[in-house]
Amino acid sequence: MPSKPPMLSKSRFIAGLQCPLRLWHQIYNSRLAAEVSPAQQAIFDMGHDVGRAATRRYPQGILIDEDHLHHPQAVESTRKAMEGMFSPAVFEAAFVHDGIRVRVDILERSGWGKWNLIEVKSSTSVKEVHVPDVAVQYHVLRGLGVRVEKAGILHLNNQYVYDGRDLDLGQLFLFSDLTEEILEQQEEVLRRVNQLKEVLAADSPPAIQPSRHCWNPYLCEFWDHCTAGMPEYWIINLNGITRRKLRELEALGVKDIRDIPEEFSLNALQARIRTCLIEGKEFIDPGLTDELGRVEYPIHFLDFETVGPAIPRYPHTRPFQTIPFQWSDYLLHADGALEHREYLCAENKDSREEFARTLLEALGEKGSIFIYTSYEKDVISSLAEALPLYRERLLPLLDRFKDLHALIRRYFYHPQFHGSFSLKDVLPALVPSMKYDRLAIQEGSMASLQYLRMLDPATPSAERDKIKRDLLTYCGHDTLGMVKIREEMLKRLSLSCTP
Ligand code: SF4
């Protein structure tokens, strides 16, 4: 540990509020952090895109481009930029005070000698964590004597509809003024800053055990390190466990679900999970027989992939509008024959109309449609709203859907689900040959990210072809997985897969 405690920064302050141990590790043990995943990187990149779009609201603004390794130089450049008479804004304005370094996204000139402190966020509303984020910046600026008139968040406006021409930056963003809350928080900011400085000046890390706070407001990068010694059936993975119950169990010294005392109050699902784990056996409720039997052939197994760009790309879409770009449908006929149909929009265009048309052709007017979670229902409902010409044919699909996820959750449990009913956990537990780890794309957020890379003209064509194949493989894996899960359920109930 250095003799002089290191500086805080805005992000270190937020990390420290989440967990002082996280702050400690960031400074003294950063090698223990997990690598940034492609999905996380995509979120960071999206934030940068939104930040760049926000600065285009001030064409004469000055960017302070020295990076964090050159903070003193950035502070000096900021001072000069603020002295200039004509610039309406300074971007990435750098300041240091009270042992804290900050970069202000946008410092907007507000009359003579006054400024607005603007933090840009790629969300569509203000979140709880945004308040201390702005409050600590305000603390620094006020300490330096900068006259801040307003402080708040510039976020995306989810009511803005892109017309397909130039983005209307005045409409795309909304400013939420947090000045009052920020002023109220100043004493608390000072208290927490001093507390975190004490943490950093201590000889040893704070003794903090991993728990729910590790995901809130952000997944901590030291999760793997901190949880390495936790039991396989750790209580935190008990489905739906509340924060209060978790605290009660921790106070009893219980870490493993199997050690939860019999008399400890759990809901029916949690009690079932505990029993399954103690007995090391699956649970199946015979009520599943009726549910699986109430189907009309041919049976479809359907999955969608979608993308939701923060900044709208296509006419008549809003920020984060869901654009479905891919479907996969396995079709099981009454004679046991299995067919596969699929669609993937490989062009950079609004795929919704083509998606709906091809899907309706594939699904026809007969047959039950298995889905996994209600996400596909939501997509169909929003397509029906966006495409009046298809509405009459899309809405009846909702009555044909059968949610396999809801059925499993209600009627079945396997110890290897590890408390999760996600397809990514359920499928490998029931069909070990269908693990996700051998797929290039293993989850929906990765599919969206890769899809955008496939559309990017800068991506080499061989790579675009590979992404297309990977997307088709991934979506097909999910739908074939549903076919196999149903087979496994029927096997356990000693029922045939066809009528
Ligand atoms: S994993 Fe949890 S306990 Fe460990 S440093 Fe991160 S937030 Fe703190």
Image: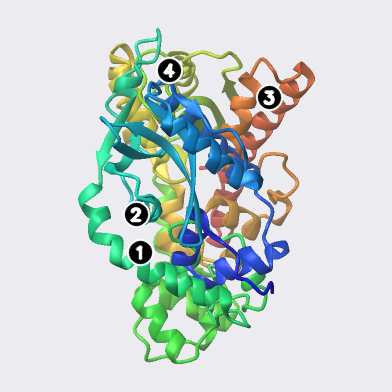
Residue carrying label 3? 468
Callout 1 secondary element? helix
Disc 1 marks a residue whose amino acid type is Val
Q: Are marks 1 and 2 in contact (CB under 8 Å)?
A: yes
Q: Is 53 rendered above or below residue 418? A: above
Residue farthest toward the right in the current orientation of the protein: 462
- Residue under numbered circle 2: 135
Task: Classify mark 4: residues with Cα within 10 Å, few (<14), some (14-19) or many (20+).
Answer: few
Mark 3 or mark 2, which is nearer the start of the sequence?
2
Q: Residues under labels 3 and 4: Cα distance?
A: 38 Å
How is the rendered protein coloured? Answer: rainbow
Residue at numbered disc 1: 189
Identified at 51% across, 13% down, the residue is 349
Q: Which-is-in-front pick, marks 2 and 3?
A: 2
Who comes first in sequence, dot 3 or dot 4?
4
Neighbourhood count class around disc 3 (C-alpha, 10 Å): few under 14, some 14–19, many 20 upward? many
Sequence-wise first label, 2 or 4: 4
- Residue 316 percent location from the top left of the image: 34, 15
Residue at image location 39% in from the left, 52% down from the top: 144
Q: Hey, what amino acid is under mark 2?
A: Ala
**Picture layout, residue 268 above or below residue 147:** below
437 lies left or right of 5: right
Residue 302 visible in the snapshot: no
Residue drawn at x 56%, y 14% as measured from the top left? 348
Gap between marks 2 and 3 measured at Cα: 45 Å
Asked which secondary structure carries label 2, the reply is helix
Residue assigned mark 4: 59
